Image (tube, rainbow, N blue to C red):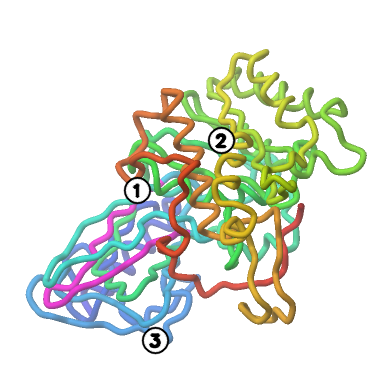
């Protein structure tokens, strides 16, 4: 009780002097490490204190004795989600995972299923300390003094997304997730990679949809690089401007940060061409990023799963990839040619096997899904993961400055030899929806 009162006083003081940005949580039972906030299986999220579990059903505390921080943990037989009200920004999160008298297996994702740690296994009696770096955002546009000067115009479906809800949410998943502690600290020195684009880049909230953007954090060194995904389904360059998404980035991006730009799928729709504002806007974004001291990187849109009679990918993107290639040369900016890499990847898979990378599922595979899903544009987690590896491969092969921040999670990758789909590890989240994302 003494500990709890102390932490409540600390929290009240922090609210008086500004929103708290550093937290130390001890997950488990009644024994609490000094200086840590106790988190038990009944710690349901409460707006008044600003932290807790999204759902406490199925949570269990196990105390093995010994060290008060690592001797007990919280676990569940289903994915569980821990949320913290925290200001937007970059954060380093330190996790103690494991069981002093057993084994564990944990996959960690944040916000909208953004992959951080995959299949972390601990041996009998082992506790491991793992770190992740996370970008937290809200929809308010602020000037350099922190004053509100605008707002991102969110779509109705975005109001349910976990990455616009003014909270940091951590998903603990897998066969035996066992969490001993969580420490959250601001990171003000990491380079931020801002991602812009459409549904093939966005952090998709619902299974079975996924994109390469939400897999990218897994491949970068923690503390040094943070991925900030601002992409959204259905967007064009113009819509990204009209909804003030790019304004949000312009008011946050710092010298040395990166701006990845991938548009084309939606821009090519009826009435749009590379000559109807696409080139002009793309060039303007490049100039603005450079003006702010950031590094623009162009990413050509990946192909759709459309094959000809010779099992070769058909270009369905008109001249948009070529336009982006030309602009990269004209403006002397780096290009990740995901269009070319995806062609190799999908042709190596072949027409039938490529379905395993896209959203192809029989009827009733997911809730409220009476009809089969057959989508040749959008990817499932396996397909998104393979495309993310293509992006990282391009960074490494071109020896771009970001290469030095690529983590050991990436070894080598050849799109002509895709990873086996049945070997890909992805325990599904609880959020599922058969409704296709905006865009095509």
From the top left corner, tell me how far across and down residue 391 is, in percent. Answer: 51, 38
In three-dimensional space, the C-alpha distance between marks 2 and 1, rounded to whole angstroms, equals 18 Å
Residue stretch in magenta: 91-110
User: Pointer 1: residues within 10 angstroms few (<14), some, or many (20+)?
Assistant: many
Give me the residue at 29% from left, 65% from top. Answer: 25
Q: Is residue 165 visible?
A: no
Residue 35 marker: none
Q: Which of 125 and 94 lies nearest the eye of the viewer? A: 125
Label 2 vs 1, first from the N-terminus? 1
Label 1 sits on residue: 92
Residue 252 marker: 2
From the top left corner, tell me how far across and down residue 253 is, in percent. Answer: 54, 32
Label 3 sits on residue: 58
Label 1 vs 3, first from the N-terminus? 3
Secondary structure of the residue carrying numbered label 2: loop
On screen, residue 208 versus residue 420, left or right, reads right
Give the quarter of the figure containing the N terminus: bottom left
Secondary structure of the residue carrying numbered label 1: strand
């Amino acid at each position: 009780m003494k500990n709890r009162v102390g932490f409540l006083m600390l929290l009240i003081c922090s609210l008086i002097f500004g929103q708290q940005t550093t937290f130390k949580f001890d997950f488990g039972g009644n024994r609490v490490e000094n200086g840590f906030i106790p988190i038990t299986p009944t710690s349901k999220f409460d707006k008044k204190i600003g932290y807790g579990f999204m759902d406490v059903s199925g949570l269990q505390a196990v105390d093995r004795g010994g060290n008060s921080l690592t001797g007990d943990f919280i676990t569940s037989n289903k994915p569980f989600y821990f949320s913290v009200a925290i200001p937007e920004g970059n954060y380093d999160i330190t996790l103690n995972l494991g069981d002093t008298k057993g084994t564990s297996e944990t996959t960690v994702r944040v916000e909208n299923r953004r992959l951080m740690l995959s299949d972390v296994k601990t041996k009998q009696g082992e506790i491991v300390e793992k770190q992740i770096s996370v970008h937290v955002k809200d929809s308010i546009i602020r000037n350099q003094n922190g004053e509100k000067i605008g707002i991102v115009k969110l779509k109705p479906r975005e109001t349910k997304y976990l990455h616009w809800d003014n909270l940091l949410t951590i998903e603990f998943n897998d066969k035996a997730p066992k969490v001993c502690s969580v420490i959250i600290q601001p990171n003000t020195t990491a380079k931020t990679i801002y991602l812009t684009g459409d549904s093939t880049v966005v952090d998709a909230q619902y299974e079975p949809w996924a994109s390469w953007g939400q897999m990218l954090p897994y491949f970068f060194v923690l503390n040094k690089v943070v991925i900030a995904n601002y992409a959204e389904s259905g967007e064009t360059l113009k819509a990204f401007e009209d909804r003030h998404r790019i304004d949000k980035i312009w008011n946050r991006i710092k010298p040395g940060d990166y701006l990845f730009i991938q548009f084309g799928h939606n821009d090519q729709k009826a009435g749009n061409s590379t000559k109807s504002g696409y080139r002009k806007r793309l060039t303007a974004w490049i100039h603005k990023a450079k003006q702010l001291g950031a590094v623009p990187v162009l990413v050509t849109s990946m192909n759709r799963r459309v094959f000809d009679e010779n099992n070769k990918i058909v270009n369905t993107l008109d001249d948009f990839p070529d336009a982006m290639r030309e602009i990269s040369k004209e403006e002397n900016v780096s290009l990740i040619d995901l269009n070319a890499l995806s062609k190799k990847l999908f042709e190596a898979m072949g027409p039938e096997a490529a379905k395993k990378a896209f959203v192809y599922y029989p009827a009733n595979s997911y809730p409220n899904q009476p009809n089969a899903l057959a989508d040749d544009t959008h990817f499932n987690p396996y397909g998104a993961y393979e495309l993310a590896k293509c992006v990282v491969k391009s960074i490494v092969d071109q020896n771009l400055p970001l290469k030095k921040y690529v983590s050991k999670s990436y070894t080598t990758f050849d799109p002509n030899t895709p990873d086996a789909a049945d070997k890909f590890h992805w325990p599904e989240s609880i959020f599922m929806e058969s409704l296709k994302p905006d865009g095509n």
